[in-house]
Image: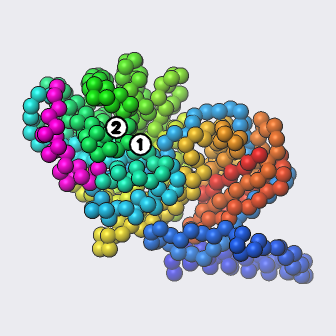
Amino acid sequence: MSGVAKRRARRRLTAAALGLILLLIAGCVAPEPETTSAPAAQRPTAAPPILDSENSSPALPPAAVTSGALTTDELVIDAGSRQQIVSGLGIDANVHSWKGGQLKPAIDAYSAWGPLTWRVIIEKSDWESAQVGDPNAIDWAYYNSVLTSPKLEDLWDTIAYIESKPGQTVSLSLMGGVPAWMGGTHILPDKEDYWVRMVASLVGYAREKRGLKLNLLSPLNEPDLNGIEGPKVDPDQTVRLFDKLGHRLESMGLGDVKFVAPDASSVEGAKSAYAPLLMADPYVRSKIAHLGVHTYSGDLADLPSTLKEGDPDVWVTEFNTACDSCDSGVKPDDSWNRATSTASILLSLLEQGASGAQLYDAWDGFYEHHGAFGYWGALAYDAQSGTYIRRQTFEVLKLLYRYLPPGFVRVRSHGASAVTAVAFADPRSGALTIVGVNGTSSSQRFRISDSSARSAFSTTEFSALTDDGVTSSPQPLSDASSLTVSVPPDSVFAVSAKR
């Protein structure tokens, strides 16, 4: 019997036992009053799956959202205490999976979520096989040949297809080592200008020759690590390289291109070594749109609190549940625990002040710098059929991202200690959104109130996702100053309350 079947069997046995106990105590059980169902045309219907799903389950009754008095706990929100603005939730996207357009259904599936930030990855960063010409001059006859190699064509096609979808933003990430003549695992000081030309020509070609909108760039990946994920570059050289690259792009009429940097593997290292130097240089600071870091533990080491007014916000450009074998060709279990762990990490990052977060990875795919197939994806790849299959992480993030579009502002909240919950406000409408995880084995019921409220709630929408793969339906709420939510056990949930 599968895990899901066992859980259903346990639920049936529990329900039967409870019914028997009530019969023995009360002698009879009064029938529930009938409820009036909405006409079929008015009932919300689930959209057909875009990709094949690994899980198929019958629908469960939706969790209830009602108005009323305090029950077991209370979540108090202060909608007036505005924190960071959500500016970039999304996924990492490896272009090696393009394969003549085979990737299109996967991109379609993600873009259907709504506005996303795509950290599009090209690796290795070694497309110039030899040192050619003057580093201060771009010979487009040369680069028109270099930048049309099969690997680069996959990059252009992937970005163009993503940008064709409404509301999608691309941030280009250069991953893996540089050409051997440039240093391989690092950038030789006397080759810095060649590195600048290589990167600037790539962006210039994307904009001028391919007509792409691209204006976010992560020039380095994990420069604090081992030289394999990206060239090893210390903070001083990072500042120098970004200064040169920024001025070169401006000279090409591409001054609107901003950096996501340093994309360090260590949040603590970014906070203590890279960020202070990057922020201390006025020009380099002006060129950084988002301070990029990576974490697979959910710990931001208080990095956002060290930044000053006017500094860039923090994006966690790689987050996921840790997986030691995923880079070496071993598939992780597609477990509900793994999916909810990833959701909890995202919520922790948002609670600590992250404005953006991109899941590593959107889909399984081959990575040159590891020399192996990576299995981090929220979409699993079936090499035999060339299709993508939704893992449970895909469904979990689909729910959370849907409720947190760009522009929402995190607000302070406390209470409802049995669940992990983070609150947000829509500055345009004043609506409140609460996203969370109930990691307990029982339903959790709590009252939501706003300490800064000036008007009553009018409508609400509630969704909860369990390992059965079922999302509850939106439900109306009568006018109330607070609302009470009943969240299913072991679930990811979201509530949107409007005034």
Under mark 1, the amino acid is Thr
Residue 133 is inside the magenta segment? no
Residue 5 in picture, x, y percent from top left: 56, 78
* Residue 146 percent location from the top left of the image: 15, 44
Amino acid beneath label 2: Ser
Check contact, mark 1 vs mark 2: CB within 8 A: yes
Question: Which residue occupies the foreground of this view, 12 or 474?
Answer: 474
Q: Which residue is mark 2?
A: 218
- Which is more toward the observer, 273 or 181? 181
Residue 128, given in percent of the width and then of the height, sits at: 14, 41
Total number of numbered discs in the rendering: 2
Res. 367 in view:
no
Residue at x 45% of width, y 72% of height: 52
Q: Which residues are magenta?
A: 136-156
Q: In the figure, residue 67 lies in which quadrant?
A: bottom right
- SS assignment at label 2: strand
List the residue tagged with mark 1: 317
Q: Which residue is painted at 73% across and 54% down in the image?
A: 460
Give the label, 1 or 2, closer to the camera.
2
Residue at 35 percent across and 51 percent down: it is 160
